[in-house]
Amino acid sequence: MGKPMQVARYWRHFKEKYRLIGGKCKSCGQVHFPKRPVCPECGSQEIEEFQFSGKGKVVSWTIIRNPPSGYEYYKPYPIALIELEEGPLVLAQLTDVDPEEIDFGMEVEMVTRKIREFSEDGIILYGYKFRPPLK
Amino acid sequence: MRKPVIIGVGLTPVGEHWKLGLRDLAVEALLNAMEDAGVDKVDSLYVGNMASGSFVEQENLGALIADWAGLGNIPAVKVEGACASGGAAVQEGVKAVMSGLEDVVAVVGVEKMTDAWPSDATRYLAYAADAEWELFHGVSFVALNALAMRLYMKEYGYTEEDLALFAVNAHANGAKNPYAMFKKVIKVETVMRSPYIADPLKLFDASPIADGAAAVIITTEEKAKEFVDKAKMIEVAGMGRAIDTINLANRKDLLLLKAAKVAAERAYKMAGVGVDNIDFFEVHDAFTVMAALSLESIGAAERGKGAMLAKEGQIAVDGDYPIQTLGGLKARGHPVGATGVYQTVEAVWQLRGEAPNQVPDAEVGLTQNIGGTGSNITVTILRRV
Ligand SMILES: [Zn+2]
C-alpha cells in the first residue's frame, strides 16, 4: 500500500489525533472518545467538544509482530488499550518504552508521534501515542 | 410464516487453492449443493463474502457467480458482515423463503484469500475493524484479539496452556473431516511452541488464512417434498443477529460478546429452545479466546467459565458441550466470508447423521459466526424436521 492517500481524509481528524479532543454529552454529561454525533449513553445529539488531559493507564496490551502492510517500519511494536483519566478507553501505540516494562495499570501520557509514511512523495501521518510520563 | 428447511449442501475443501479462483470455488460449491438438493434452478442467490474487492479486486459477486453458475436472470447480491458474512447470507436466504417472496433460494459463502500477500491480507482483514480509530494505529485483527486474550487470562486466572485446549480440540475433530485444511492432531505443547504473532496470542491460537466456498439450498417444508426425503430436510428453527460497537475500545465490558448474547437470545426465542436443548455448537473460534467468550455469551457457560469447559473435557464430541465438531475455524480453516456457510453445512451433516465425526443422536445444533472483534454476530439454530 504505497499509494498516496487523500490528504483530506486525514486532516479532518486533526483535532482528535493531534490534541485528543473528544466529545461530551450536554444532556447526560458522558464523555467519549472519539466524538460521536449521538450520545451512546442517552441518545442526545447535543454533543460538545471535550479536551482530554492525555493521562491514562494501560488496561491491556500486545506486541504486534505481524503488522498490516504499511506499518512494517516499527515492527515489532506495542499496542495498548488505555483508560483515560476521564473514563473512556483509547487504543494507541506505546512509545519510548521497553516492552518488558509494560504492565497492567502502568501510567502513561499522550505524545504526538509519526504513525506512518506513504512512500517517498506521499503524506506522513501523525497522531497520538502514549509513553510512560517523563520524570 | 413458512417453515424454512435446508435441502442441499455443497462445499470445496478449505485450503490454499492456487489453481482455483474465487468464481471457480463458488460455482463448484453452489453446483454441488444444487445437485445434493436435486434442484436445477433457484429463485435467487445470496453470496456471503467479506472482502473480495480487496483480496481479488472483484465486487458484484451476485452477478458474477449467478452468471457463471448458469442461474439465469435471477436476483443475486452479496451480503457483507465481515467474518460473519456467511452466517448473515444464510439468514437473508432464510428470510426470503419465510417471507413467501422466494421459494427456492441458494446461498453461497466464498473467500479467496491466498491471492494476496500475507501482510496485505492482514490489512484487508483489519478493514473490518474501525479504520480511523483502530487500523490507523497499525493494529491487526490478531492484535485486537490478543488484547482480549490477555484481559481474559488476567480476569479469570487462566493460562496460555488453558486456552490452547481449544486449538487441541479443534484439531482433533478436524483430523476426521476430509474437507478440513489441517487434518493433524496437535498437543498443548504444539500450540505453546508456536511463535507469538501478537503476545500472548500465538500462531496456533489463530485460524489460518485460506480459500474456500460452501453453499446451501433453502426452501419451505412444503416445497421440499418435491425434491428430497424427510431425512434430508433440516429446519432453520431460529436465528438472531446483532451488532456491537465496531471499535473494541468503545465497549463497556471488553470480555462480553454482547452481540452474540443478544443474537443467541433472539435465536433461542424463535426456535423455542434453550441452551440445554442444543446438542452441539459450531462457534466462531477464529482465536482460542473467542471460543471461550463465545461459549459464555451464548449461555453454554457462565461468565469466566468458558475455558473451564475445555479443561473439563466437555467440548469434545462426547462431552456435554461439543464444539467445532468438524475442526472449527482453527482446523477446518477460516475463509472469512465463507465460514458461516461452512458452519451451516457442518451442522446439516451432524443433523442428517452424516458427519465424519458424528455427535450421537444430534437433534438440534447451533452455529455462531462473529464479524469484526465481536461487532457483528449471527446465531442460527438448526433442527431435524
Ligand atoms: Zn448523553
Image (cartoon, grey):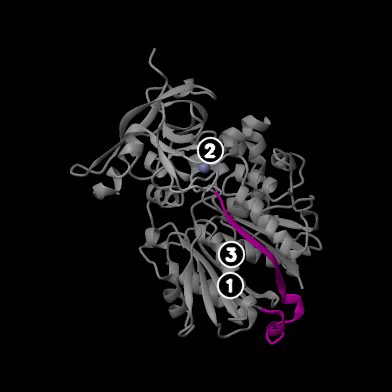
How far is the residue under mark 2 from the one under mark 1? 34 Å
Find residue B224 and report its image quarter.
bottom right
| Residue underneath mark 2 | B146
Q: Could you say whether the residue bearing mark 1 is in a helix, strand or loop?
A: helix
* Pointers 1 and 3 within a single chain: yes
The mark that comes first in sequence, 1 or 3, is: 1
Magenta residues span B220-244
The chain letter for the residue carrying disc 2 is: B
Question: In the rendered structure, does residue B229 fall within the stretch colored magenta?
Answer: yes
Ligand 1 lies under 8 Å from the Cβ of mark 2: no
How far is the residue under mark 1 from the one under mark 3? 11 Å
| Residue underneath mark 3 | B341
Which residue: 41% across, 26% down? A53
Dividing the image into 4 quarters, which one contains the C terminus of chain A? top left
Q: Residues within 10 Å of mark 3 (few under 14, many from 20)?
A: many
| Residue underneath mark 1 | B93
Up/down of B21 relative to B296, above or below: below
Looking at this view, is B324 or B51 the one in front?
A: B51
Question: In the rendered structure, does residue A53 fall within the stretch colored magenta?
Answer: no
Which residue: 37% across, 50% down? B120
**Mark 3 near mark 2, Cβ–Cβ under 8 Å?**
no
How far is the residue under mark 3 from the one under mark 2? 26 Å
Q: Position of residue B306 (x, y in %)?
A: 70, 42
Answer left or right for B235 relative to B209. right
Which residue: 43% across, 57% down? B114
**Mark 2 near mark 1, Cβ–Cβ under 8 Å?**
no
The chain letter for the residue carrying disc 3 is: B
Q: Residues within 10 Å of mark 2 (few under 14, many from 20)?
A: many
Q: Could you say whether the residue bearing mark 2 is in a helix, strand or loop?
A: helix
Q: Amino acid at mark 1?
A: Gly
Q: Position of residue A110 (x, y in %)?
A: 38, 27
Q: Taking the image as drawn, is residue A49 in sight?
A: yes
